Amino acid sequence: MKLVVRHRAAAFGSKGMTGQHDSERQVGSSPKRLSQNSILQATRPTPESGAAGFVTGSQIHLALFFTRTISLVTWDRQGILEREIALYTRLAQRGVHTHFITYGDRRDLAFEHRLPGISVHCNRWGLPRRWYRRHLVRLHRRVLSRCHLYKTNQIDGGLAAVEAARRWRRPLIARCGYLWSDFAAEQYGGDSPEAREADRVEREVFAAADRCVVTTAAMADRIAERIPSVAKSIQVIPNYVDTALFRPLENRTEEVDLLFIGRWSPQKNIPALIEAVRALPVRLRLIGGRPPSSRTGETDFPSRVEVLEPQPHHCLPELIHSAKVFVLPSLYEGHPKVLIEAMACGRPVIAADVPGIRQVVRHEHNGLLCGTEAGSIRAAIVRLLGDERLRRRLAENARRDAVALYGLDHVVNRELALIEELTKHGRNLHVA
């Protein structure tokens, strides 16, 4: 049996694998031939396989558990890889080596040369996704047993971090940029199975954590209200922006009037934005691709609406500066990074007055808030495009607030202080 499983895992290596879906379909097609013991014996780590990134000395080792299903390939395709790794490459310069525990296949390993101070640990065996999720902690035990502490990137996927923290008795940071249960309730309904499952996982992960890190005070209050027992362990560390990359430019060419950046999903409320500009003599640029139903060109986009595919993160500053105004009409948000990046560029912004956004945008101080319906979005657009003095004042305040509140160096210092606090009694852990 062991030889059969090894053969199957090898058959879906970096050369033969066409994708995670293909891997699950083919390997998982004969479940009777796979047992827990045979899978785990076939994937038993060699002495070399778990040692990557470990050195002697005072270096701190942090394991970051990715959101379920998310990989470095996913981040790269979405154009957010550089943004997401920025914090951890900076922490590496301060003595923290991060181990990414991802849900990708061997293709994730190809990114390691672009990640100084970061090691990648993925489904290199090509196992069925459901098997990999179930046994992730045991599969990466050689790495996880050597780390000083664990952290979640979001709560979906956090149960694996809880399992590791309990098994090796290490500190756990339950971090999230949005409340999964609130998003599930918005998308599926408050009493839906999805919302109930998200609430269950949040409660378990937050209760097991040494520190619960959220990005806004409103999220902290919401958790404290729902789970009073964890109130004292909640800490607010906002999302960050690289204010050296995202900065005002003097010599810029404003090619379009309005810019939106984000994936096409009901949450982002893009149809209302398109409807808002349909009768206006303005140019709108949407970056993030077309909706699935429009891949063949069926969707009716006004002629003055330009749609671009997701762009690499380092290209966003120039694109943000190509527009007079940045618009984010979402129905709900966590702590929107692209909005903060637009503000850091010194661009005037229009954003919906909804949770997650109203904690960032102060109406008529560093941006304009509007409703989520087309008429309200249209009124804000007409007002801001027609008032250059207002645009200039909002833009100056937006830049000032982004630097003061969300600068990358500021967030790195706060993250490092938390990491050092939680590991100060376990720094002599043997990891060599």
Image (cartoon, rainbow, N blue to C red):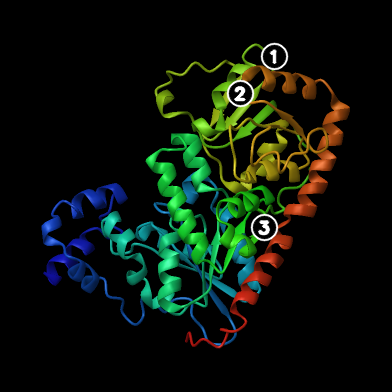
Q: Position of residue 152 (x, y in %)?
A: 51, 61
Q: Amino acid at mark 2?
A: Leu
Quadrant (top left/top right/bottom left/bottom right) for the N terminus: bottom left
Q: Is residue 226 above or below residue 426?
A: above
Q: Is residue 61 left or right of residue 254?
A: left
Identify residue for label 1. 281
* Residue sitting at x 60%, y 51%: 225
Identify residue for label 2. 273
Q: Is residue 217 above or below residue 174?
A: above
Q: Nearer the viewer, mark 2 or mark 3?
A: 3
- Determine the CA span between mark 2 and mark 1: 14 Å
Q: Position of residue 333 (x, y in %)?
A: 59, 40
Q: Secondary structure at mark 1?
A: loop
Q: Is residue 370 left or right of residue 88?
A: right
Q: Amino acid at mark 3?
A: Val
- Tell me the quarter of the picture where residue 137 sits: bottom left
The answer, for residue 19, to whether it is visible in the render is no
- Determine the CA span between mark 1 and mark 3: 42 Å
Q: Secondary structure at mark 2?
A: helix
Dots 2, 3 in contact, CB < 8 A: no
Q: Position of residue 139 (x, y in %)?
A: 32, 70
* Residue sitting at x 45%, y 34%: 189
Identify residue for label 3. 236
Q: Secondary structure at mark 3?
A: strand
* Residue sitting at x 68%, y 27%: 258
Q: Is residue 225 above or below residue 193?
A: below
